[in-house]
Image (cartoon, rainbow, N blue to C red):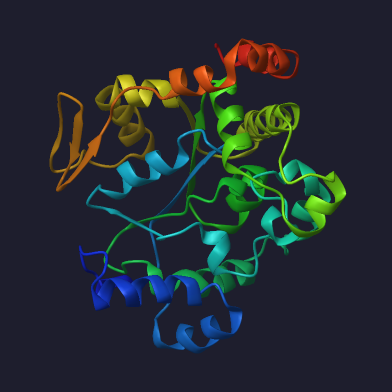
Amino acid sequence: MKFLDFIHDNGTGTPKALIRRAALRGYVNPLLRSVIRPFFSEPNPAKWVFPVGCYNSGTTLTQSILAAHQDFTTLPREGVKFTSHLPQPEDLGWTRMWIGCEDYMERGLGPATALTYKAILTDWAPWFSSNKSIFMDKSVTNGTRMPWLDQVFPNSYFIGIFRNGFAASEGIRRKAKPTGSARRKLGSDRYSLKMAGSQWVAANDKILADSKRVQHFLSIQYEELISEPIVTLNKIWDFLEVQRPHHMALEGNFLTINNTSFLLLGSTNAGSLERLGQEGINELAPTINVMQSKLGY
């Protein structure tokens, strides 16, 4: 049983829900982690699954759907928030923009050893259900360290999620803001469209290159997951060599996996393109067009 099982509640304003939110915020603190960890035994998963992709490319949706499978357990937030052993660009103020601190992302990784694995697993243990066989972490920055993760985490499987670059870049620029030293370096509290597009290109380029350096890798498109969820998910189940969910059905816009339903209203790319307008599309195109073609968009 994972820690969240003790405080699970469907309500949003109940005492249990408030405790849950406090626990999630508090566990980010390394000191609090050191107090809580000893009360939980180290789990032993059969497989690790890492959905990877650029920011705003559907990794969260993919994680949520996979987590409804009876064999899966996942972290309630990105795993980088719950350990000090995985660097994230937010450490330096580069919110959703790891191209701003690539050296830090590389230097911040420890040795790819069993001891590193044990340290991270110990940090994550309170949040995983020990009676599940497949553990999953969706940290977007895992796309920068796939070969390292493949060495550290036994029996790792990577699912690369790709999305139209105009839509993903628009989402990065709209949702992300640099802070602290990153903001001072940029001289702005907002990323440019070109920088958002460069992040999308770099993320996809890194994932495509490193996909050849890991043992298990599957690529899917966000748009296919939305338009043909059953077909796409069956590809994923086969790739992971797991049984189908006990219940999987698509009724209208509702995808149901076991006891969890997901509303799929179609790709949100159209809204992003509308927000960009022709001027934004023209501005982004020189930065992303080569990768767009490479990914089949």
Residue 88 in picture, x, y percent from top left: 67, 56
Q: Is residue 28 visible?
A: yes
The picture quadrant where one finds residue 147 is top right
Name the residue at 32% across, 32% down: 238
Vertical comparison of 33 with 131: above or below: below
Q: Tell me how many marks there are.
A: 0
Quadrant housing the N terminus: bottom left
Residue occupying the point 43% across, 26% down: 222
Q: Quadrant of residue 42?
A: bottom left
Q: Quadrant of the C terminus?
A: top right
Relative to 44, residue 171 above or below: above
What percent of the width, then of the height, locates residue 189?
73, 46
Q: Which residue is at a point 54% across and 57% down the rendered structure image?
A: 153
Q: Horizontally, is 214 left or right of 186 in the view?
A: left
Judge by depth and name the residue closer to the eye, 259 or 152: 259
In the image, 58 versus 69, the foreground residue is 58
Residue nearest the viewer, comparing 157 with 162? 162
